[in-house]
């Protein structure tokens, strides 16, 4: 539909309107045919008998009723036909359907409402976990006629990501809600287009580039200066805000060749949000975050998401800010690329690498935004969650990790090496345990390009029809006691170092998927792990104590009191984990950090 239409209007005109007008149009056409037939003389050869249409059926109220009845008949007829086809296919395959969650309202509107409410008010994807109490770890959410199969079984997820990879696509279920932000980039494309994007981007994520710690050093040093300045006054600081700015600055330098310098804006004070970012670079950051939030709501609403956007595309104003900032950078790089062999392209950045291969601004822009999402948001949450656990769990974990930092890197070395990072086994265990309990991407979806059979642990053959959307809860998978042991809900980095690692994870690696798996494994996985490791090392060189500061939060930001009687980790959680496309903590992570003066940490200015 033309851009002048809002998503809601476009959806009605392209999807609902044809169904609504079909029956009235047929009635009016029948009436015209009968009238035209009547004007011919009866001496002509016999004609098809066309009955006269009653005049009352031609009145506007009758046509409106006919429209509604015809639309419902179309929907029910289509659903009935689809059901019959699927039942026939199931019988041939000797399979059974996945059990459907039963709501109380037509179309499972009450289930959809609970799902959307949980997006804002509940623990991240707790709703999906709650359903498992009655339906197990594989079930179907039928929302307004759309089937979404939800699984937390590692074998099912392995099929989608690896063993049956060719028949699982991002599809319209993901692309439609996100295309206004991610375009046709690597995370939002399928088939040959995906292969083209992947092959274009992969060479840039070489070990040489992902282990170049100089970028990490510049921005982590800037963050340390800001933290030390605040801590010198005894004030609390929002580490989630710092992690988001730090990773945005390093990611944009890595990708664009210039940092957005988001750490140049004033830091938030306890009880208050960050000040508005109105200048070009920081406005880009805020717009990027807001656009992703819209995408997340759309994904939760399902295929009918346009019905929430009748007034206009909710991402449009945000994307204008993003394009106003990014387009001049891309255009300049295209103008300066190699010409007639006299000028070498600058391939030290992702932008330069892409420009050396292609000069399509839209393609390049989409690719940069896709990789920015993966390289910034996921790493920012990982860093934040690491310090959340260090601040709220047993203090011996912080002490042990800091001692490893001092033993391997020392108290003053401002730039740990890749070899030193590899040597730090406990650091990697802390990171893994953080990503297990608080994965940066807590859920994901794919769409089936053809029908298939999933075999359950009890041997049941489940029918997975073509076109269905499958969602998996990574956060639910990572917390299953059957997969991780009776202490699955506890934060314990030693599970990655003792016999439990071999018993659980090494026996079935698909129970741990913070970066997904198979051919679409995250391109920036090593970049993210290296940056998170570097930041943790530098912060722990400088600070020997991290105290959670609940008094710094505004009203309503901390978990509600009823969580104390909740399930899973709700009773022990000090913060409210929530999500857009990636996870974050509602209200941030406010802590007080004590500087270790005895170690003589090197200046970071």
Image (cartoon, grey):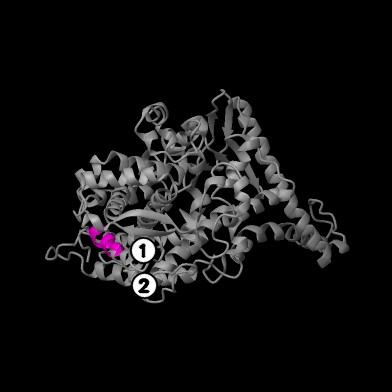
The reply to whether the magenta stretch includes residue 279 is no
Element assignment for label 2:
loop
Residue 366 visible, this orientation = no
Name the foreground residue: 572 vs 98: 572
Residue 198 shown left or right of residue 15 in the figure: left
Name the foreground residue: 72 vs 581: 581
Residue 223: mark in rendering: none
At 54% from the left and 60% from the top, the residue drawn is 557
Label 1 sits on residue: 245
Tell me whether circle 2 and circle 1 mark residues in contact (CB < 8 Å).
Answer: yes
Name the foreground residue: 278 vs 59: 278
Up/down of 600 relative to 442, above or below:
below
Q: Which residues are magenta?
A: 215-224
Q: Residue furthest left?
A: 342
Label 2 sits on residue: 265
Quarter containing the N terminus: bottom right
x and y, in percent, of residue 501 in the image: 38, 31
At 59% from the left and 58% from the top, the residue drawn is 305
Residue 202 shown left or right of residue 20 in the figure: left
């Amino acid at each position: 539909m033309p851009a002048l239409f809002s998503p809601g209007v476009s959806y009605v005109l392209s999807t609902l309107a044809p169904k609504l007008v079909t029956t009235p149009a047929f009635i009016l056409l029948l009436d015209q045919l009968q009238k035209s037939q009547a004007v011919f003389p009866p001496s002509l050869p016999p004609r098809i008998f066309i009955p006269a249409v009653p005049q009352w059926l031609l009145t506007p109220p009758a046509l409106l009723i006919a429209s509604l009845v015809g639309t419902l008949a179309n929907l029910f007829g289509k659903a009935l036909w689809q059901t019959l086809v699927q039942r026939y296919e199931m019988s041939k395959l000797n399979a059974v359907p996945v059990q459907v969650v039963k709501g109380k309202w037509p179309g499972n509107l009450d289930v959809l409402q609970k799902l959307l409410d949980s997006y804002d008010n509940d623990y991240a994807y707790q709703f999906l976990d709650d359903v498992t109490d009655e339906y197990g770890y594989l079930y179907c959410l039928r929302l307004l006629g759309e089937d979404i199969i939800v699984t937390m079984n590692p074998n099912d997820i392995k099929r989608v990501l690896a063993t049956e990879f060719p028949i699982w696509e991002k599809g319209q279920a993901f692309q439609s809600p996100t295309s206004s932000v991610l375009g046709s980039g690597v995370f939002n494309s399928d088939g040959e287009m995906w292969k083209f994007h992947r092959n274009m981007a992969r060479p840039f994520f070489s070990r040489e580039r992902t282990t170049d710690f100089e970028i990490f050093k510049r921005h982590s040093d800037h963050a340390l200066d800001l933290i030390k300045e605040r801590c010198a006054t005894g004030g609390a600081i929002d580490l989630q805000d710092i992690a988001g700015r730090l990773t945005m600055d390093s990611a944009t330098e890595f990708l664009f060749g210039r940092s957005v310098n988001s750490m140049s804006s004033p830091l938030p004070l306890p009880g208050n949000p960050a000040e508005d970012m109105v200048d070009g670079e920081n406005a880009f950051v805020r717009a990027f975050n807001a656009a992703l939030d819209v995408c997340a709501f759309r994904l939760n609403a399902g295929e009918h998401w346009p019905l929430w956007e009748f007034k206009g595309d909710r991402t449009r104003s945000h994307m204008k800010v993003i394009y106003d900032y990014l387009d001049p950078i891309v255009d300049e790089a295209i103008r300066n690329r190699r010409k007639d062999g006299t000028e070498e392209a600058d391939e030290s950045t992702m932008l330069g690498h892409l420009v050396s291969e292609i000069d399509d601004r839209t393609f390049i822009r989409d690719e940069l935004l896709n990789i920015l999402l993966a390289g910034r948001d996921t790493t920012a949450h990982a860093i934040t969650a690491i310090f959340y656990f260090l601040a709220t769990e047993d203090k011996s974990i912080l002490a042990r990790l800091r001692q490893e930092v001092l033993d391997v890197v020392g108290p003053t070395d401002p730039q740990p090496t890749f070899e030193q990072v590899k040597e730090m086994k406990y650091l990697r265990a802390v990171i893994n345990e953080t990503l297990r309990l608080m994965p940066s991407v807590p859920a994901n979806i794919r769409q089936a390009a053809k029908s298939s059979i999933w075999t359950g642990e009890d041997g049941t053959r489940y029918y997975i029809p073509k076109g269905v959307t499958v969602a998996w809860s990574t956060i639910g998978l990572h917390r299953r006691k059957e997969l991780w042991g009776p202490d699955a809900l506890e934060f314990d980095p030693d599970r990655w170092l003792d016999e439990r690692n071999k018993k659980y994870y090494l026996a079935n690696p698909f129970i741990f998927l913070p970066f997904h798996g198979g051919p679409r494994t995250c391109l920036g996985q090593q970049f993210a792990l290296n940056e998170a490791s570097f930041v943790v090392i530098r912060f722990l060189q400088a600070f020997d104590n991290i105290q959670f500061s609940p008094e710094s939060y505004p009203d309503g930001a901390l978990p509600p009191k009823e969580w104390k009687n909740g399930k899973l980790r709700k009773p022990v959680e000090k913060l409210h984990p929530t999500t857009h496309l990636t996870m974050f903590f509602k209200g941030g992570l406010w802590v007080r950090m004590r500087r270790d003066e005895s170690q003589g940490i090197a200046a970071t200015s």
